[in-house]
Image (cartoon, rainbow, N blue to C red):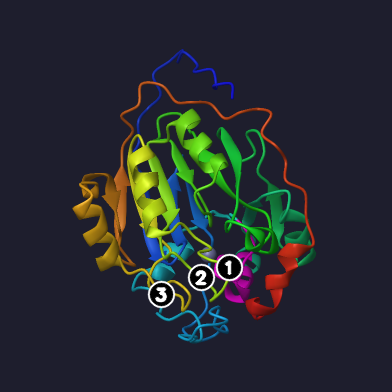
Amino acid sequence: MPRARLPTPTAEPQRTPMKLLQLRSATCLLDYAGQRLLVDPMLAAPGAMPGFKLLGGGRRRNPLVPLPAGTDAALASATAVLLTHEHPDHFDAAGRAFARGRGLPVHATAVDAPHLRAKGLDARVVEGGSLGFPAEVIRARHAHGPLGYFLGPVAGYYLAAPGEPTVYVVGDAVLVDAVREAVERLAPEIIVAPAGSANVGFGGDILFSPHELETLVRLAPGRVVLNHLEALDHCPTTRDQLRARMTAAGLMSKVFIPEDGEQLEFTTNAERQAQPREDAPITRPGIQKWMTAPFSGA
Ligand SMILES: [Zn+2]
């Protein structure tokens, strides 16, 4: 795999802190490069959506918990939505209504953008400098084996604004080669990864298992923010369990496990930023992603 060429900076960019406000599950607000990117907004009231745990017990209506205090003010400051994939725990009816009502651009992959436009959203495909700074779409898989196909194409984003920490928002994924390759090639200073080790009762984990999370943290050159926790019926891993595991592995110094409503702040230490690959593959829509549409409460 060719390595990205690292550019020589021609001028020292101004370094600004990046802020990540954890709201709930995968939903967070990224204060990045002068924008406030609302990542994967699931804004429903508790119990507004069906359970996602289909077999094996433990099914409850979602979300399990409310949004934290201060959410309204955070949402009011959002300037755009950044969507990893169109599953209902990442963009629900309430999230869509919010984005539509505010007229916010919804930055999404080529898979999701046409469908989002059909829902009246101002969807824009993330490519090249479309976010206003260099970014790359990084494809992943939502599960190992056949379930990964049926859960549809998913992706994450590498963000590399000058003067900001480089960030890899992984989106829903298991530890596949594409994720490892992205971490090695791009050396993101911050990785945001889903940690609830979700399962629907068959087909294995549909997010990183605790063992895979440990591997991801070991691979990470910088810090790892773990979210997508304690908000959905099919996500059994708790923050306490993760803290215990990362502490036992000697990795807790690299890890943040924010509470809902907690804000983290990061300043770049990198002398150089790996630049996005210009030939990053464009994902085309598949039919299988719509299997999850009935859960969205649209
Ligand atoms: Zn999810």
Q: Secondary structure at mark 1?
A: loop
Residue 126 lies, with reference to residue 162, above or below; the image says below
Q: Which residue carries the number 3 mark?
A: 67
Q: Nearer the viewer, residue 289 or 261?
A: 289
Distance between the alpha carbons at the discs numbered 1 and 3? 30 Å
Depth check, front residue: 255 or 159: 255
Q: In the image, which is nearer the foreground, mark 2 or mark 3?
A: 2
Mark 3 neighbour class, 10 Å CA radius: few under 14, some 14 to 19, many 20 or more: many
Provide the residue span drawn in magenta: 85-99
Dot 1 and dot 2 residues touching (CB under 8 Å): yes
Q: Can you say whether 187 is above or below 8 in the image?
A: below
Residue 169 % position (x, y): 48, 48
Q: Locate residue 17, reporting x and y percent.
A: 33, 40
Depth-wise, is mark 1 or mark 2 nearer the camera?
1
Callout 3: CB less than 8 Å from ligand 1: no
Residues at marks 2 and 3 touching, judged by CB atoms closer than 8 Å: no
The numbered disc on residue 203 is: 1
Q: Which mark is residue 199?
A: 2
Give the mark, 1 or 3, whose residue is nearer the N terminus. 3
